[in-house]
Amino acid sequence: MIGASTAIAGVGATDFSSDSGRSELQLALEAILAALEDAGVSPEDVDGMVTYTLDTSPEWEIARNMGTGPLTFFNRVPHGGGAACGTIAQAVMAVKSGAASTVVCYRAFNERSGRRFGIGPQEGNAPTAEMVHLGWHRPYGHLSAGSWVGMYARRYMAKYGATSADFGRVTVAMRQWAATNPAARFFERPLTLEEHQASRWIAEPLRLLDCCLESDGGVAFVVTSLERARDLRKPPVVVSSVGQISAPGQERMTGYYLRDDLTRLPEVEMLGGQLWRESGRSRSDVDVAVVYDHFTPMVLMQLEALGFCAPGEAAAFVADGHLGRDGSLPTNPNGGQLGEAYIHGMNGIAEAARQVRGESVNQVASVETALVTSGTGVPTSAMILTADTDRP
Amino acid sequence: MIGASTAIAGVGATDFSSDSGRSELQLALEAILAALEDAGVSPEDVDGMVTYTLDTSPEWEIARNMGTGPLTFFNRVPHGGGAACGTIAQAVMAVKSGAASTVVCYRAFNERSGRRFGIGPQEGNAPTAEMVHLGWHRPYGHLSAGSWVGMYARRYMAKYGATSADFGRVTVAMRQWAATNPAARFFERPLTLEEHQASRWIAEPLRLLDCCLESDGGVAFVVTSLERARDLRKPPVVVSSVGQISAPGQERMTGYYLRDDLTRLPEVEMLGGQLWRESGRSRSDVDVAVVYDHFTPMVLMQLEALGFCAPGEAAAFVADGHLGRDGSLPTNPNGGQLGEAYIHGMNGIAEAARQVRGESVNQVASVETALVTSGTGVPTSAMILTADTDRP
């Protein structure tokens, strides 16, 4: 766990759509240039870049197209949405260790109009460790994220008596937020629980509306030292604590056999403990949460793993309206990936940063501390962002 | 550029072969367990892992098979052999910033018996930035690394009057070293220049014996703080300076149009300058060099980029025997990737570490400082390793 002396100084995004009409490289560049503009930093100042292993736009293409000087730091973070806060973690490490001073984190894809993750195996059949591993799952129809997550969801229902409606209330809460966010795919389109319950099965017990959107778009950030961020255009969003975890028994969304309790997320539990410890914040300090919502049941499990509810009590917590505008834990005020767009978690980080700055369209009152999580069931990452209250 | 307070504490490798008979995961585990044994560190102590984006064995598979505790740091380094020292750079950043304390860097593949890089395009045809880029090169037969490097080599010949024999002398020097290294593929098989000259064209002006081996195998390292390394089994190999560079006009081995002079390697020039500056060492301090030798002409260009020779003079430098046992710059004493094996640069790092420890089979006398480079023509990395002479 690292943090405290670094900040997000710039936030940028493209529009979110189901058919961008542009290349993934174009989307990445648009998002990055917007983030640089937001920070008031020029492309020549950028000396480090981080993206996902799944991103198709290499940093040298970005640098060349954008007119960046030499890069002295670059890497990629694996495991899909688990990488979201992990990109910020890499940037923080680079800045803290002196490897780079101005790092761009980005993720851009045509996940709806191009390669869709939900359509099943696309990795080929090379005799790699991952393919051998998946060979134990694919013959049983476990071909995509929805099918893997369905297993966790089913166990959660069996153990705690949760219902499809309990999952649906997560989507309803997200769509409520999205309805007042003009950037959201579901702007002005709130959802009723009845509509959720009428939506078709994708991988039982997951309905269509338990699954996040598929979206085209890009999001980018500028990370630099807190000291430097204070001299830039916008108020710094302090990376108070950020970390990655790959927990014992970790697999890539298929951890059914090695763990005693499928309804728990040990990597999220560990991250939570570390975040509170390192940031000096507690659960009650969290003014806004961004909880990775690729699938509704995982939101419930994350709320429990982070200690906002006791095990099995998240459904009631959601039903009581705690995730909403007047709740005790306003969550995903952008509408989340169920309501705004699915940009692999990066749009959630953007919303957390906006909330800390006080510039969100769905602004929560006086936000000082935001919690952000990343993809679940995989090696993942999380962070605490805070306002720059210690400014000298 | 970062370094100085961290060290390589363990070095491990498998045998090198053309048909390992084991999975890439097995090779990775063998190399890592050997590195941990070498350092005297147990698998449970490992809390970070780094490998190449091209590696097929994810850290969670490694961790699970090896019995590692939670990992708090993991990423991947892109650009094939350009990643070699880059993996050490990531580990150093993690240790310096506090993200992890004991990081394993690894690379293992069946590059000869499995997926061979030399057989041409294997990336599919998705409309990604890299595929669009390669669309400008593939129609002209530029399908693999050899064909790309041939362009640089041809220009070098035209500009400086270099000949195929000049390239061949690099291979002869490497094979001389390999001949006395039992771990080398070419152990006891030195090469004559005549044999080099008789070898067939791969991509003119590159002959078969200008191209590195294709090999199965794995290499791994344990990186930790210098302070902790001093308490471990073997003398620390200090990472005195390590860095990555993606230079202006950078492409992935196809930078023919954006750069004024194809015979220069600006990323290596920049790395060199930074290494000397940060490590406080100069060229004359280098007791042993490990120069990335995927293709012979690139060795010449690197010697020039690093300032060991003036532009155009590396061929004479090699002909004068400077890379050999009694030369002024003993280079690749393991036999390099032309003589020992092609493990994507990681076996060169292992040799540099052994030289600093004084435990190589081809030990150079009293090595205090070793220079290591990584793949060329791509965003790359380099480092200076030194003996622990400042030990209190």
Image (cartoon, coloured by chain):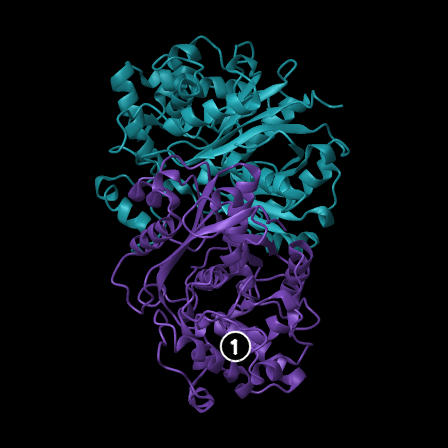
Chain colours: A purple, B cyan
Where residue A261 sits: x, y (%)?
Answer: 69, 73
Where residue A270 sits: x, y (%)?
Answer: 67, 61
Q: Nearer the viewer, residue B308 or B188?
A: B308
Report the quarter where the C terminus of chain B lies: top right
Mark 1 lies on residue: A296
Residue at the front extreme?
A: A392
Amino acid carrying mark 1 in the image: Thr
Q: Nearer the viewer, residue B210 or B274?
A: B274
Q: Nearer the viewer, residue A367 or A351?
A: A367
Kindly indicate the quadrant of the structure image that contains residue B225: top right
Q: Secondary structure at mark 1?
A: helix
Residue under mark 1: which chain is it in? A
Q: What residue is drawn where x is 57% and y is 87%?
A: A163
**In the picture shown, does residue A307 fall above or below A190?**
above
User: Is the residue marked by circle 1 packed among few (<14), some (14-19), or many (20+) residues within 10 Å?
Assistant: many
Kindly indicate the quadrant of the structure image that contains residue A152: bottom right
